[in-house]
Image (tube, rainbow, N blue to C red):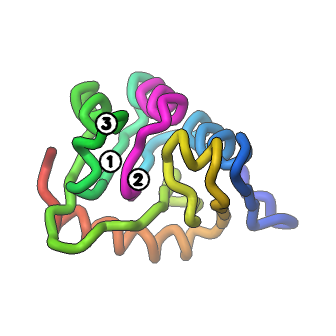
Amino acid sequence: MENNLSHPIRTAFSPGEDCRNLIIELINNAISNLEICVFTISDDLITSALIRAFDNGINIRIITDNDKKNDLGSDIKELYYKGIEVHIDESPNHMHHKFMIVDQQLLLTGSYNWTRSAAKYNEENLIVVYDTQTANDFQLVFDSLWERTVSF
């Protein structure tokens, strides 16, 4: 990931392809690892990018909410069966985060759900912050959630 110091932040908005394309771009450009914490994943294009990255040696860990893992169209089981580590939040509350840490260097976050509906219909947003301290702050949250969640 190249850190563009003149533009340390990128944004994208939906509906449309911009948010989905940004997620896929970051997945495709990952060098070593992706830490993903999202309510659900049901966008097949994002899922395909994750599987390709995993098959190319990128370490991927995903945390998702238990209420969404069995939804019609959910790709969580497929990702798990491909060998990607998936943890499920089984607390009585929703794990509603939507963020991804790429190579401990940058953070993707925003309201954008990783679903087909988000790209096609919803007013949502993403922001990429090219800052290792911010990525580290979110990594601490990810690690804490990983310890409190259960393996798929």
Residue of label 3: 72
Query: Total marks drawn?
Result: 3
Contact between labelled residues 2 and 1, with CB atoms less than 8 Å apart:
yes
Q: Considering depth in this image, is 133 or 86 the residue closer to the camera?
A: 86
- Name the residue at 38% across, 67% down: 96
- Amino acid at circle 2: Ile
- Name the residue at 43% across, 45% down: 33
Q: Nearer the viewer, mark 3 or mark 2?
A: 3
Q: Is residue 12 visible?
A: yes
Q: Which residues are magenta?
A: 37-52
Name above or below for residue 41 compared with residue 87: above
Please give the label number shown on residue 38. Answer: none
Residue of label 2: 36
Residue of label 1: 61
Marks 3/1: CA–CA distance = 22 Å
Q: SS of the residue at dot 1?
A: strand
Q: SS of the residue at dot 3?
A: loop
